[in-house]
Image (cartoon, grey):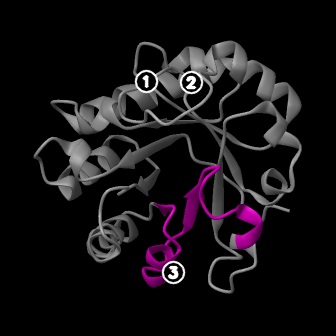
């Protein structure tokens, strides 16, 4: 069973590359000041050493603001920085395996859903939240299977009580519709990382959620 509540509403997924030449720590802090309440560091193309260095820098910032840091699919990094949790997909280490690891078994575990059939498996049972990816097609993540759309979120919402974190081309113009469809939390990359003013972008998104 999942162990952790997931009360968060605005979830930033960040990498250095997504920040388009700006300091990713500055972008993260501006996002937090604007209303982001959980952050995932996703460094798919970095070495573990580089990923670890970035995670060590970022967790100083997130700890300062009491914002949980989730590590994307890197057990070593998640353990070494004592992150709040780890997020995995179908081709990564399984949530069941993560729950068996002494340093991770009590952490937040997120699991990306690409098929409805995953809702019935043991991996979903032990996860704390489900990543619904993507809601809409996005250039920041191209290795996905299903484009869920609003109807997909509604269907998943009827089939599970797990917290749903929606991601994929979400912005202030469609944020409220995604929440109304059944998502508990909105995860964004470009809508904040590529925004001219990340703090303002986060504030506008949070405002849509809270309407």
Q: Earlier in the sequence, mark 3 or mark 2?
A: 3
Magenta range: 70-97
How far across and down, in percent of the image, does residue 138 sit?
A: 41, 25
The location of residue 189, given as percent across then percent down, is 36, 38
Location of the N terminus (image quadrant):
bottom right
> Circle 3 sits in a helix, a strand or a loop, which is it?
helix
Measure the C-alpha gap from mark 1 to mark 2.
7 Å
- Whether tag 3 and tag 2 are in contact, CB under 8 A, the answer is no
Residue at image mark 1: 169
Q: Is 67 rendered above or below residue 205?
A: below
User: Which residue position holds label 3?
Assistant: 79
Seen at 64% across and 71% down, the residue is 107
Q: Is residue 197 magenta?
A: no
From the image, tell me which residue sits under label 2. Answer: 135
Q: Are marks 3 and 1 in contact (CB under 8 Å)?
A: no
Asked whether disc 1 touches disc 2, contact meaning CB atoms under 8 Å apart, the reply is yes
What residue is at 54 percent from the left and 18 percent from the top?
Answer: 176
- Mark number for residue 90? none
Earlier residue among tags 3 and 1:
3
Q: In the image, residue 80 lies at what x, y percent?
A: 45, 84
The verdict on residue 76 being magenta is: yes
Total numbered labels placed on residues in the image: 3
| Snapshot quadrant of residue 104 | bottom right
């Amino acid at each position: 069973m999942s162990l952790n509540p997931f009360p968060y509403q605005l979830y930033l997924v960040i990498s250095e590359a997504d920040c388009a030449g700006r300091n990713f720590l500055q972008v993260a802090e501006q996002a937090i000041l604007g209303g982001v309440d959980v952050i995932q560091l996703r460094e798919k193309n970095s070495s573990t050493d580089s990923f670890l260095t970035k995670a060590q820098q970022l967790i100083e910032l997130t700890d300062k603001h009491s914002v949980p840091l989730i590590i994307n699919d890197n057990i070593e990094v998640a353990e070494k920085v004592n992150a709040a949790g780890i997020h995995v997909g179908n081709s990564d280490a399984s949530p069941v395996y993560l729950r068996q690891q002494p340093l991770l078994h009590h952490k937040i575990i997120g699991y990306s859903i690409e098929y409805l059939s995953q809702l019935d498996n043991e991996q979903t049972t032990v996860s704390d939240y489900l990543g619904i990816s993507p809601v809409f097609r996005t250039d920041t993540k191209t290795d996905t299977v299903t484009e869920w759309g609003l109807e997909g979120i509604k269907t998943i919402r009827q089939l599970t009580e797990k917290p749903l974190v929606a991601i994929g081309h979400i912005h202030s113009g469609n944020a409220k519709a995604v929440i109304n469809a059944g998502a508990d939390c909105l995860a964004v990359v470009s809508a904040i990382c590529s925004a001219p003013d990340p703090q303002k972008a986060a504030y506008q998104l949070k405002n849509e959620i809270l309407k």
